[in-house]
Amino acid sequence: MDDFLQASLSYPTVLFTVLLGVMLLYWLLVILGAVGLDLLGGHDHGVDVGHHADGGHPLEAADATEAPSAFRLRQVPVTVSLSLLVFWGWLLCHLGSHYLLPLLAFLSAGVAGTALLLAGALGATVLTKLCVAPLAPLFHTHQATRRQDLVGQMVTIRTGRVDRKFGQALLDDKERSLLLEVRCDAERGLKRGQRVLVISVDDEGQSYEVEPIDELLDEAPKRDRV
């Protein structure tokens, strides 16, 4: 036990020991619900992290949340990747103090410790990347589709008729498959399998106004002539 504590509190392991203590406190607060999992920022959802939304570059305003991005660790929340980095760094430095430092006795304690610190940080990065890949699906989220986002979408009628009281249509693309309540004047004569365009949203009736595509195409030249 004395050897364990001595190694944990000696350079360079002590740096990771302090960070490990901070991370353990953080996860305790997460369990208690005092802080959120994405305290330092969420993951990238596969978005290119080379630019910010305002057009700037990460190197122009680097912060703690961007360090994991440089190593492509943002497939999970920043706190998760940092926790893994700290854990693996602590473990590698702890083991290195027992098995590697004796082999570097010809170097000064500071130089040997720094070499172990760099090696531990590099090894921790590699091990964290290996851990992040299988963990990424657990943190994958889908952004909910807003009703207004469906305006202008092409849908297919799925019911035998569509009028002001009844009608359904299917939005089926590569990203989603949604069955929508749609409404249209009965005189339009919409039939099952017909392609129509969503032109507006009725929030009160929780439905969508649709129009036949052929009629919209016929009206376009008329508007151009006017």
Image: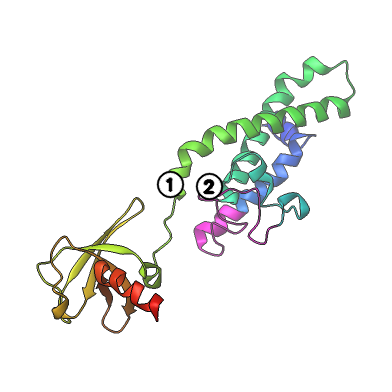
Residue furthest left as drawn: 160
Residue 157, given in percent of the width and then of the height, sits at 19, 64
- Three-letter amino acid code at disc 1? Leu
Query: Residue 182's image quarter?
Result: bottom left
99 with respect to 79 (left or right): right
Magenta range: 26-55
Secondary structure at numbered mark 2: loop
* Image quadrant where one finds the N terminus: top right
80 with respect to 146 (left or right): right
Assign the magenta stretch its main secondary structure.
loop
**Residue at which label 1 appears:** 138
Query: Residue 97's image quarter?
Result: top right
* Dot 2 and dot 1 residues touching (CB under 8 Å): yes
Q: Of residues 21 and 71, which is closer to you in this image?
A: 71
78 with respect to 113 (left or right): left
Magenta stretch encompasses residue 89: no
Question: Tag on residue 76?
Answer: 2
Question: Tag on residue 23?
Answer: none
Secondary structure at numbered mark 1: helix
Q: Residue at x 54, y 32 (%)?
A: 130
